[in-house]
Amino acid sequence: MQPNELRTIFDHRPFRPLRIHIKDGRTYDVRFRELVIVGNDYLTLGIPAPLERDAIYDSVDHLRLDEIDHIDRLGGPPASGR
């Protein structure tokens, strides 16, 4: 995915939770826009603790943009197609 495409998806207002699908089968649920940083080649994603209800991260993952297969809105229509 391209950085501008990701910025458009993540900057949609109001923000709705998303699921990032990685080409190797992993998924990441994004509940907080504040925990996402879009770079030119990587997406930095703060991972909250399982029961955390605020935008406080417990760990961080760096995802290569070319590893992202697609992104779906949780509980709604897709944010982007495959």
Image: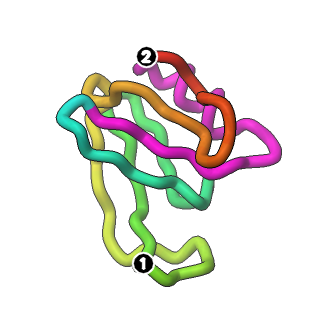
Left or right relative to 19: residue 32: right
Name the image colouring.
Answer: rainbow
Q: Secondary structure at mark 2?
A: loop
Of residues 76 and 42, the one nearer the viewer is: 76
Residue 16 versus residue 6: which sits nearer the camera? 16
Name the residue furthest right: 14
- Percent coordinates x, y for residue 74 in the rendering: 60, 47
Residue at the (56%, 45%) spot, across then down: 18
Spatial distance from mark 2 to mark 1, Cα to Cα? 28 Å
Q: Quadrant of residue 12?
A: top right
Task: Tell me which segment is drawn in magenta.
Answer: 1-22
Q: Identify the image quadrant of the N terminus.
A: top left
Q: Secondary structure at mark 1?
A: loop
- Type of amino acid at the residue the image marks with label 1: Pro
Residue plotted at (28% across, 23% down): 66
Q: Which mark is residue 82?
A: 2
Image quadrant where one finds the C terminus = top left
Magenta span contains residue 12: yes
Determine whether 2 is above or below 79 in the image.
above
Q: What percent of the width, then of the height, locates residue 36? A: 50, 51
Q: From this viewpoint, which residue is outermost toward the bottom?
A: 51
Residue drawn 29% across the image and 35% down it: 22
Was residue 3 drawn as part of the magenta stretch in this picture? yes
Residue 16 against residue 80 in the figure, above or below: below
Labelled disc at residue 50: 1
Image coordinates for residue 41, horizontal then vertical, percent: 32, 29
